[in-house]
Image (cartoon, rainbow, N blue to C red):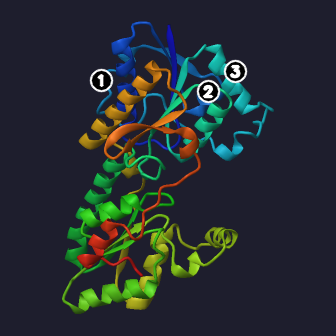
Amino acid sequence: MLRIGILTSGGDCQALNAAMRGVIKGLSVKRNDLEIYGFRDGYKGLIYDIADRMTPDDFSGILNRGGTILGTSRQPFKKMRIPDENGLDKVEAMKNNYRKYKLDCLVVLGGNGTHKTANLLREEGLNVVTLPKTIDNDLWGTEMTFGFQSAVDIATDTIDRIHTTASSHSRVFIIEVMGHKVGHVTLQSGIAGGADVILLPEIPYDIDKVAEVVENRFAAGKKFSIIAVAEGAISKEDAKLKKKQYKAKLAERRYPSVAYEIAAALEEKTNREIRVTVPGHTQRGGAPCAYDRVLATRVGAYAAELILNKEYGYMVGIVDGDTKKVPLSEVAGKLKYVDPKCQMIKDAKTIGISFGE
């Protein structure tokens, strides 16, 4: 008997179902004694024993389905060692439920916080294999995470649509793109969508330089400007602040988000009509693109191979274009940022895209 537990944790994204399907199909092809337990709503299900006995058929027909059939929730890593309101030790509870179901392996699909907890469980003696899920593509140890390309496609589509209304009204449009603390989605969707300015967390911006780009475009006869802004974009002034100082400043921010703050500053400096568009959670929703379906299937299949070979304690990553096992101990707690000196940034600058420097 091969007993597998599986859960999806953190923010949802496209291709979670496709990845789970890859794991289960990979296992069920080789083993007819597979016993599957799906934990509901991420680590919450593992903590509070909310699980369903499932069969391979439950994972059929979900390749192109967005979201996650298991549900998900955020269980912050920093609170995992803190007992809940009833005094429950969450880590011990997870270990006990793992043993209750006599699991041979726990399969975890998630992003950075999820991988920290997965590594903690590994350190506690559980057999864990993980898959790299996040639209942000910021997981260390893999070149690509599933959900990323789908998010880029949606953000690009938003920028494409904004182009027509921006040109019709001779306006400056700011599109705020998801990505948490990194700018991978904004960089690629900005280039793909033909943005004139791309503002990333990794390259602090000078608002005067952004205003200069806008004014130069109007002076050159350009009727509109498109600015793609990462939700974590930061000014040069704020980048000089200490972490606590910056957090305190954010707490006092008068605007809903950084895009609105930039819009207000640009209106003051240019006297132009500025509009803000925030596609928000649409970037995480809907069916996965073809690229993500293939990627999720590949990492899922490789995870199945690891489990069949009893190789635990790894994340399945993409390294040099191939599926590889990456030690969880090396992944947990690390972010993969955009390299300001990377070739993609250089190429974007070559064609005149400004990064507000």
* Residue 16 circle label: none
- Residue type at mark 1 is Gly
Residue 93: percent from left, percent from top: 71, 26
Which residue: 36% across, 49% down?
Answer: 148
- Residue type at mark 2 is Leu
Of the residues under marks 3 and 2, which one precedes in the sequence?
2
Disc 1 element? loop
Q: Is disc 3 surrounded by few (<14), some (14 to 19) or many (20+) residues within 10 Å?
A: some
Which residue: 69% across, 69% down?
Answer: 244
| Residue at the limit of the structure toward the right, as seen here | 87
Look at the picture and state if 25 lies above or below 356.
Answer: above
Q: Quadrant of residue 77?
A: top right
* Residue 289 shows in the view: no
Q: Please give the residue where the numbered disc 1 appears in the rendered image.
A: 61
- Residue type at mark 3 is Asn
Look at the picture and state if 20 lies above or below 10.
Answer: above
Q: Quadrant of residue 168?
A: bottom left
Q: Is disc 1 surrounded by few (<14), some (14 to 19) or many (20+) residues within 10 Å?
A: few
Indicate left or right for 124 with 53 as reference: right
Q: Please give the residue where the numbered disc 3 appears in the rendered image.
A: 96
* Residue 46 circle label: 2
Q: Is disc 2 surrounded by few (<14), some (14 to 19) or many (20+) residues within 10 Å?
A: many
